[in-house]
Image (cartoon, grey):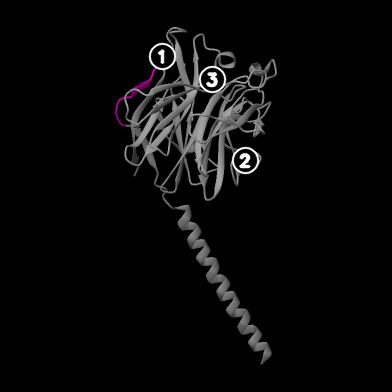
Amino acid sequence: MLHKIYISIMIDRNVILWALTGFLLLMTGHLMGQHIVYEQPEIKGPFVHIFDPNDTRSTEDSTWYTNDHTFIKGDDGVWHAYGIIGHHPIRPWGGETRFFHITATSIQQIKWEDKGYALTTKEGQERVLWAPYVLHDKKSWYMFYNIGNMQPNAPNEASWGQLCMAKSDDLNTWERHPYNPLFSDPGHARDSYILKYKKKYYYYYTRTYNEIDHRSVVAVRTGPDLFHWSGPKIVHVQPYTVNWGGDAESPFVILRKGIFYLFICRAMTAYNQTDVYWSTSPDNFPRENLVCSLPVHATEIIYDKKEGWYISNTGWDKKGLFLAPLVWKQLQ
């Protein structure tokens, strides 16, 4: 009798296992064949020249330009933008030592108000000020940026870029974090962007694959807050080799309808080309997942609930900062 019961139990268990196996195989096949629907960003309208630094600095020079920058809206509804500023001849390691600061009451404002400089390098401690990104978190604003490397030959090597942070309570006055840098990485690590997703912060930035392998990459570090970061993980690789990782610059990540979109500037391939890649994960953007290319440099994507989506354009070959409307088109 016990023997029969044992056989019955074994048969029932096998039936259950076969059923589960069949179900898992069915689900796997379904997921493998699942069609991912992603969208394509499209510039919808002309670019407006919102800031020409030569308008207010012509007594000093007439060849001013802007480069990597960031936009943020204050609690009072006023928009702020900060970014790299310099003039010709172009000297990234010697002439980009301040962040411009401009404001507007609307993202659609034709000309933004020049507020001077948000930060200036600290002599003997900061060699450059590059590529700020500003994030609002817990009633304060935080700016993330690069200060270069004080070693004499740093511009000519895959030197370790230092990623730093400053804090503001009003978007006008900034206080540097006392324990800067937050971290350093090879290949002139720079071009900060931070995404908050499921109670975790993702810190994206540009660098080389390592000190010897100079492929251009985007890396990410994660953390529970803005002060403690994990080790780096490479999330996107471009084959172009240069000691500053210049073919995967200005990373910017947008999450829409469950899909992540990585924007990177392909400055070494084409100075005014930004490629967009899609992913279902925030920490892996394969090159084969190319969505489109956009004719812009060091672009930022801006969203306002009332005024919609916008895209920026700037660079050494332009006199300042430009904005244009952006739309998202679903691809079938």
When the figure is inspected, residue 103 is found, relative to residue 278, above or below; the finding is above
Label 2, secondary structure: give it.
Answer: loop
Q: Is residue 45 magenta?
A: yes
Q: Amino acid at mark 3?
A: Arg
Estimate how packed mark 2 is, as few (under 14), some (14 to 19) or many (20 or more) residues with alpha carbons within 10 Å.
Answer: few
Q: Quadrant of the C terminus?
A: top left
Q: What residue is at 41 percent from the left and 30 percent from the top?
A: 293
Residue 178 relative to residue 262: left or right: right
When the figure is inspected, residue 4 is found, relative to residue 208, above or below; the finding is below
Quarter-of-image position of residue 44: top left
Q: What residue is at 68 percent from the left and 19 percent from the top?
A: 150
Residue 48 relative to residue 16: left or right: left
- Cα separation, mark 3 vs mark 1, equals 15 Å
Part of the protein shown in magenta: 44-55
Tell me, for residue 98, which label it has, or none: 3
Q: Position of residue 108 (x, y in %)?
A: 32, 30
